Image: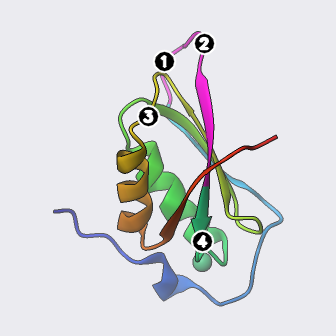
């Protein structure tokens, strides 16, 4: 099992939502992508968003992750349909609570 720093260790407790965190894998040009929205609860700042972004980005097929700390909405673009259990596991590995699929605009 990987050893990860828990983002909460670094949190100052102040929400910081000015800059959405975006994680993108480089080096591949892709055609049609699947996009899904997920709810993640417990995030309070940019460090939280970074941790969630890194864990979800590591899920097979994920190409782009965008986290909105204020709403807890996480928009994920992937090359194929994702296993929801894998997304949940990534969120929990980052130290947060998975809240299910949500429709994102
Ligand atoms: Cu945080």
Distance from disc 4 to disc 1, alpha carbons, whole Å, reads 31 Å
Which residue bears the numbered disc 1? 28
Element under label 2? loop
Mark 1 or 3, closer to the camera? 3
Bounds of the magenta segment: 26-38
Inspect the magenta stretch and tell me whether residue 33 lies in it: yes
- The local secondary structure at tag 4 comes to strand
Give the mark, 3 or 2, whose residue is nearer the N terminus.
2
Compute the Cα span from label 3 to label 2. Answer: 14 Å
Residue 84 falls in which quadrant of the image?
top left
Number of marks: 4
Ligand 1 sits in quadrant: bottom right
Q: Quadrant of the C terminus?
A: top right
Mark 4 or mark 2, which is nearer to you?
A: 4
Mark 2 vs 1: CB contact within 8 A:
no
Give the residue number, with chain letter if any, for mark 3. Answer: 82
Which sits earlier in the primary sequence, circle 1 or circle 3? 1
SS for callout 1: loop
Q: Is residue 58 above or below residue 35?
A: below
Q: Earlier in the sequence, mark 4 or mark 2?
A: 2
Mark positioned earlier in the residue sequence (4 or 1): 1
Q: Which quarter shows the N terminus?
A: bottom left
Q: Which residue is mark 2?
A: 32
Residue occupied by mark 4: 41
Whole-angstrom CA distance, mark 4 to mark 2, is 29 Å
């Amino acid at each position: 099992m990987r050893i990860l720093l828990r983002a909460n260790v670094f949190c100052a407790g102040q929400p910081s939502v000015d800059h959405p965190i975006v994680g993108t894998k480089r080096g591949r040009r892709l055609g049609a992508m699947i996009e899904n929205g997920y709810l993640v609860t417990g995030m309070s700042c940019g460090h939280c968003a970074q941790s969630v972004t890194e864990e979800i980005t590591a899920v097979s097929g994920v190409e782009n992750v965008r986290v909105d700390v204020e709403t807890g909405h996480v928009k994920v673009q992937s090359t194929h349909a994702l296993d929801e259990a894998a997304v949940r596991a990534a969120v929990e590995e980052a130290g947060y609570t998975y809240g299910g699929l949500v429709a994102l605009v």
